[in-house]
Image: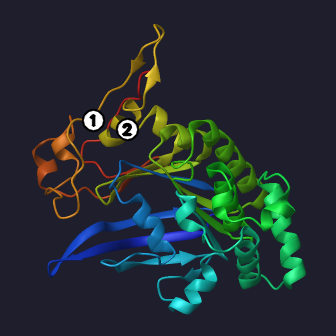
């Protein structure tokens, strides 16, 4: 990996227009993805993970809008591109794996039509070349009889097969960055492991950077090099994955880890829940957004919004960070 980020997001703010008021959904978030790296984005539902991914490829749905910040991909500013220019980036230089393949695939166009259209839009290939590349990608994602699959429609495939098509669509134009938003959420548990293994192998082959958005820390442990922990539209911590699981700095990160079900020797399941609930946009408390749920909160946490500060290879936004590693 080089020292120059592939994707660099700085001070990005996303707002929601509601009753003539601007409500902050993402509050000046900054993070980067290095070439070839998998950056995991984690947090509870409503933390702003998917909004961040959609904002990068300019797919925010009104009343959401980007009101501040810069987004740079391989040295090119994306936030200043016209919608037409952004369409060339989206699906080309940036591939996107959506969490629900039935909403991301066109139900009235064949699998082959969708793949070939994407390939020809972003690569200088003729119809025959695009068809060959489409067949090659269906084979690479493990679909049986790729040539016959070209003529099928999304509803004729199982959920796992559709998600394999979505992964092929995201990678077929040779992107430099892949954003995968909860890529296994809509799938049966028996299929999830196969899809994750496929995504990991194809990512390694392509050398692209990846943003992996998920609420599942088990997925992060298997896939991510670094992790950005989101809470209530802010970043709580960014850390190498190995350090996050052994020595988190932010109490919220520790809460997420301890809230992951784990089997005990007697066959029971251990689970520590974080008290309370994450506030929604427009209801963020003053100071640190996590302080009403935090066992380490002190008086200053109720007043001061903690900035991201460096602590070794980790950056965290906590006035009273954790100092001891987690017990096994």
Residue 119 at what x, y percent from top left? 75, 77
For label 1, the residue is 274
Front one among 292 and 22: 22
Q: State left or right for residue 312 relative to residue 24.
A: right
Residue 1 visible, this angle: no
Q: State left or right for residue 277 relative to residue 115.
A: left
Q: Mark 1: which secondary structure?
A: loop
Residue 189 at what x, y percent from top left? 57, 37
Q: State left or right for residue 214 relative to residue 110.
A: left
The residue at 27%/35% (across/down) is: 274
Front one among 159 and 130: 159
Q: What count of labels does the image hold? A: 2
The residue at 84%/59% (across/down) is: 146
Residue 34 at what x, y percent from top left? 61, 62
The answer to whether 166 is drawn above or below residue 244 in the figure is: below
Classify 10 Å Cα crowding around label 1: few (below 14), some (14-19), many (20 and above).
some
The answer to whether 25 is drawn above or below residue 305 in the figure is: below
Classify 10 Å Cα crowding around label 2: few (below 14), some (14-19), many (20 and above).
many
Residue 275 visible, this angle: yes
Front one among 202 and 187: 187
Residue 301 at what x, y percent from top left? 16, 49
Locate the N terminus and report the quarter of the image it occupies.
bottom right
For label 2, the residue is 256
Distance CA(mark 2)–CA(mark 1): 8 Å
The residue at 83%/57% (across/down) is: 139
N-terminal label among 2 and 1: 2
Front one among 1 and 162: 162
Q: Mark 2: which secondary structure?
A: helix
Q: Do residues under tags 2 and 1 come within 8 Å of each other at their CB atoms? A: yes
């Amino acid at each position: 990996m080089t020292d120059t980020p592939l994707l660099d997001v700085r001070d990005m703010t996303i707002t929601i227009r509601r009753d003539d008021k601007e409500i902050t959904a993402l509050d000046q978030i900054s993070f980067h993805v290095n070439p070839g790296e998998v950056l995991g984005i984690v947090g509870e539902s409503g933390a702003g993970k998917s909004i961040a991914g959609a904002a990068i490829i300019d797919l925010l749905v009104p009343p959401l809008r980007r009101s501040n910040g810069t987004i740079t991909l391989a040295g090119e500013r994306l936030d200043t591109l016209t919608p037409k220019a952004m369409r060339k980036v989206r699906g080309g230089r940036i591939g996107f794996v959506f969490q629900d393949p039935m909403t991301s695939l066109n139900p009235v166009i064949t699998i082959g039509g969708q793949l070939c259209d994407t390939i020809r839009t972003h690569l200088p290939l003729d119809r025959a070349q695009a068809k060959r590349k489409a067949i090659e990608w269906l084979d690479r994602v493990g679909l049986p009889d790729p040539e016959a699959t070209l003529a099928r429609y999304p509803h004729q495939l199982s959920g796992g097969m559709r998600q394999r098509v979505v992964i092929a669509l995201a990678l077929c134009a040779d992107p430099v960055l892949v954003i995968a938003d909860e890529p296994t959420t809509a799938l049966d548990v028996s299929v999830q492991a196969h899809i994750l293994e496929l995504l990991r192998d194809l990512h390694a082959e392509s050398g692209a950077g990846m943003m992996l958005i998920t609420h599942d820390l088990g997925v992060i442990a298997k896939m991510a090099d670094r992790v950005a922990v989101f809470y209530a539209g802010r970043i709580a911590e960014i850390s190498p994955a190995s350090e996050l699981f052994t020595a988190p700095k932010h109490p919220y990160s520790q809460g997420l880890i301890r809230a992951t079900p784990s089997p005990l020797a007697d066959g029971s399941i251990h689970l520590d829940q974080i008290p309370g609930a994450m506030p929604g946009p427009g209801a963020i408390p003053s100071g640190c957004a996590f302080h009403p749920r935090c066992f380490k909160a002190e008086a200053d946490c109720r007043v001061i919004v903690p900035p991201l500060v460096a602590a070794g290879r980790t950056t965290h936004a906590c006035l009273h960070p954790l100092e001891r590693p987690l017990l096994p």
